[in-house]
Amino acid sequence: MSTSVLKQSGFTLVEAMVSLVVLSVGMIGIAALYAQGLGAERTAIYRTQAVNLVADMADRIRSNRLGQAAYAGGAANNGCDPQSGGANCTPAQMAAHDLFVWNQQVTALLPGGQWQIQYNPGAVPPSVTLNLTWTEVNQGQVTHQMLIQVPNN
């Protein structure tokens, strides 16, 4: 009796196809994670910019205490930048100019960026609420809000 021994060498076509499917599924998973990471990075950038913009306006309001009620008004380019010689502006003119500059920054840095400022003189000390809203992809409208209290004197 003779027994024949068959030796196998190399991969069969089925094994090659299975390994190709497993590799393809892994690559699709990596691509999905990469796309999700890009979206999270974009969201983080917008949120950081919103926090910085609101903090900037809060600092402007704190430095212009006498004009804080005017920050609830309209924006106007009054040329109150110290670099352009606008040191003779009233507190209300400075507030309007700050709003003008801030509006330009908000619309340039945030997609669909909108802002609203509310002044509450009845609070002790008076308070100002800053609302900044922008549009996030796949999330809709996102709002960042800050409440600051600034004494008049």
Image: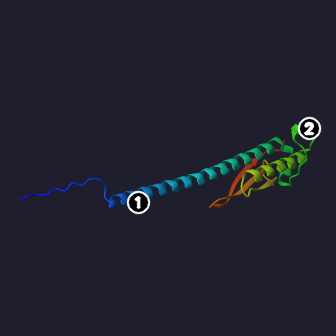
- Residue drawn at x 83%, y 47% as measured from the top left: 98
Q: Taking 19 as reference, is 80 left or right?
A: right
Q: Which of the 4 image quarters holds residue 18? A: bottom left
Residue 147 visible in the snapshot: yes
Q: Nearer the viewer, residue 54 or 151?
A: 54
Residue 97 tag number: none
Q: Nearer the viewer, mark 1 or mark 2?
A: 1
Q: Is residue 48 left or right of residue 72?
A: left
Which scheme is used to colour this image of the protein?
rainbow
User: Which part of the image, by quadrant, shows the N terminus?
Assistant: bottom left
Give amino acid for label 1: Val
Regarding residue 126, the answer to whether it shows in the image is no
Locate residue 69 relative to residue 137 in the image: left or right. right
Q: Position of residue 72 (x, y in %)?
A: 83, 54
Q: In percent of the image, x 80 and y 45: which residue is there?
A: 61
Residue occupied by mark 1: 21
Q: Is residue 80 left or right of residue 148?
A: right
Examine the rendered structure and indicate whether residue 66 appears above or below residue 36. Answer: above
Which secondary structure lies at badge 1? helix
Name the residue: 86% across, 47% down: 97
In the rendered structure, which disc, 1 or 2, sits on the residue that comes first in sequence?
1
Residue 67: horizontal and vertical position, in percent?
Answer: 86, 47
SS for dot 2: loop
Distance from the alpha carbon under mark 1 to that under mark 2: 69 Å
Question: Residue 63 occupies which quadrant of the picture?
Answer: top right
Characterize the local packing of mark 2: few (<14), some (14-19) or many (20 or more) Cα atoms within 10 angstroms: few
> In terms of depth relative to the viewer, which is nearer, 122 or 14?
14
Q: Quadrant of the C terminus?
A: top right
Residue 45 in percent (x, y) is at 65, 49
Up/down of 44 relative to 135, above or below:
above
Looking at the rendered structure, the kind of residue marked 2 is Gly
Q: Which residue is mark 2?
A: 85
